[in-house]
Image (cartoon, rainbow, N blue to C red):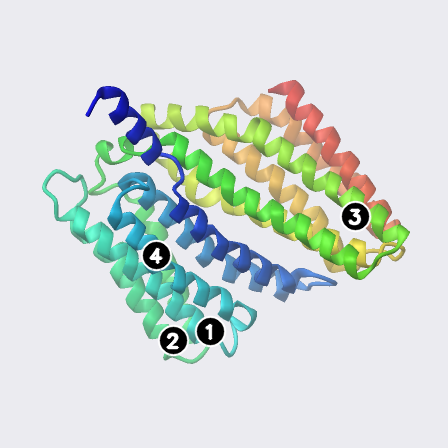
């Protein structure tokens, strides 16, 4: 095989494969199901339920992403792993409406199933003498949490959720411990694939936002709802522009620097943790926009107010934290993140409380537009 052909094959192997894109269809459903509980006037319990159920799903997706990144999307074992994980993720999505209630056992079994799939592929890789990974890491990171999730399916609440917390905590702690992970392991990561996959997940969440706006408008087809829908679309479009114009480019540069410098903590935080905050922010914004389109002439209910304000703040906080972890100067970040901290409570929150819903969305659109310009100016 020629060098050109080998290079082409390697490049294709490092791009998102069709198996990965097919897998993402499951997450479209997961995000849609979980977001339903945030419409209307969600209380603290609704927000808590969303975060508790969304994080394990995100965590499974992030682990799948890193696994594919290391093994390659064209690898038959990788494709078998993705195929084997899809029913498990579908089970988690189907159980999500009552994921903390009557279907918690099914949600737990889905989470256990995913970890068993991880274990099989990483165990096979760890047994190779040339792979910088000790055998105990896939056992503790995959097999033990799978056992905890399985056990939780047979245990009543609240002990069930204690086991969930222990399973997730074990994985988080192991990510913070570098024992057994040599520098060579992180050198294997392909930046282009990581940036592409996270970007595609953000596209899923943004697509759910547009879907929410359009479907709600179809059910409330009035002039005021149409105005709120257009303004809501502007908010989503501006968030997309911010992320794909500056966020992905900054991520590519930052990950290259982090891998080159061996900054494993920055890689972990910006690939596994902080994108969860970002996509959670977009999801709760979408729920608030749907509520505004449904009742544009009324004040947003308190839960929707907190969703809109908190979502904008979470989106920019995640972007600010990612920029800092990639080595951007605190003063530079503060020039566009500082106004967000001031304007959300000083302008957006009063608008949500005092203006009709369409007016609150108009203020949100203006705020996001202003912050986008400040971000562009100081980048």
Helix, strand or loop at mark 2: loop
Measured Cα–Cα span from mark 3 to mark 1: 35 Å
The earlier-in-sequence mark between 4 and 3 is: 4
Quadrant location, the N terminus: top left
Q: Nearer the viewer, residue 283 or 23?
A: 23
- Image location of residue 322, percent across then percent down: 50, 34
Name the residue that disc number 3 marks: 229
Callout in the foreground (1, 4): 4
Name the residue that disc number 4 marks: 83
Q: Which of 257 and 213 is in front in this view?
A: 213
Name the residue that disc number 1 marks: 104
Q: Which residue is drawn at 74% across and 51% down?
A: 289
The earlier-in-sequence mark between 1 and 4 is: 4
Q: Which of 134 and 83 is in front in this view?
A: 83
Measured Cα–Cα span from mark 4 to mark 2: 23 Å
Helix, strand or loop at mark 1: helix
């Amino acid at each position: 095989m020629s060098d050109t052909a080998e290079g082409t094959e390697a490049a294709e192997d490092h791009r998102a494969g069709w198996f990965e894109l097919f897998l993402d269809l499951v997450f479209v459903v997961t995000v849609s199901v979980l977001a339903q509980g945030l419409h209307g006037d969600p209380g603290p319990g609704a927000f808590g339920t969303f975060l508790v159920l969304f994080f394990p799903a995100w965590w499974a997706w992030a682990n799948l992403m890193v696994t594919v990144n290391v093994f390659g999307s064209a690898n038959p074992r990788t494709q078998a792993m993705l195929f084997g994980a899809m029913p498990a993720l579908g089970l988690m999505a189907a159980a999500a409406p009552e994921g903390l209630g009557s279907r918690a056992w099914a949600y737990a079994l889905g989470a256990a199933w995913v970890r068993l799939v991880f274990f099989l592929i990483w165990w096979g890789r760890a047994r190779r003498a040339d792979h910088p990974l000790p055998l105990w890491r896939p056992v503790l990171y995959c097999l033990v949490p799978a056992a905890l999730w399985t056990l939780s399916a047979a245990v009543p609440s609240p002990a069930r959720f204690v086991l969930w917390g222990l399973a997730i905590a074990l994985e988080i702690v192991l990510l913070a411990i570098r024992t057994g992970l040599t520098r060579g392991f992180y050198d294997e990561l392909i930046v282009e694939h990581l940036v592409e996959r996270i970007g595609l997940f953000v596209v899923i969440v943004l697509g759910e936002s547009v879907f929410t706006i359009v479907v709600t408008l179809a059910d409330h087809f009035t002039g005021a709802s149409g105005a709120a829908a257009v303004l809501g679309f502007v908010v989503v479009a501006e968030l997309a522009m911010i992320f794909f114009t500056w966020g992905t480019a900054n991520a590519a540069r930052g990950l290259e620097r982090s891998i080159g410098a061996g900054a494993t903590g920055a890689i972990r935080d910006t690939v596994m943790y902080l994108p969860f905050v970002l996509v959670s922010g977009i999801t709760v914004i979408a729920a608030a926009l749907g509520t505004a389109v449904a009742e544009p002439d009324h004040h947003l209910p308190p839960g929707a107010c907190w969703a809109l304000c908190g979502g904008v703040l979470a989106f920019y906080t995640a972007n600010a934290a990612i920029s800092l972890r990639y080595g951007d100067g605190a003063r530079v970040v503060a020039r566009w993140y500082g106004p967000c901290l001031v304007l959300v409570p000083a302008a957006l929150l009063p608008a949500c409380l005092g203006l009709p819903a369409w007016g609150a969305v108009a203020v949100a659109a203006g705020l996001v537009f202003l912050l986008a310009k400040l971000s562009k100016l100081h980048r």
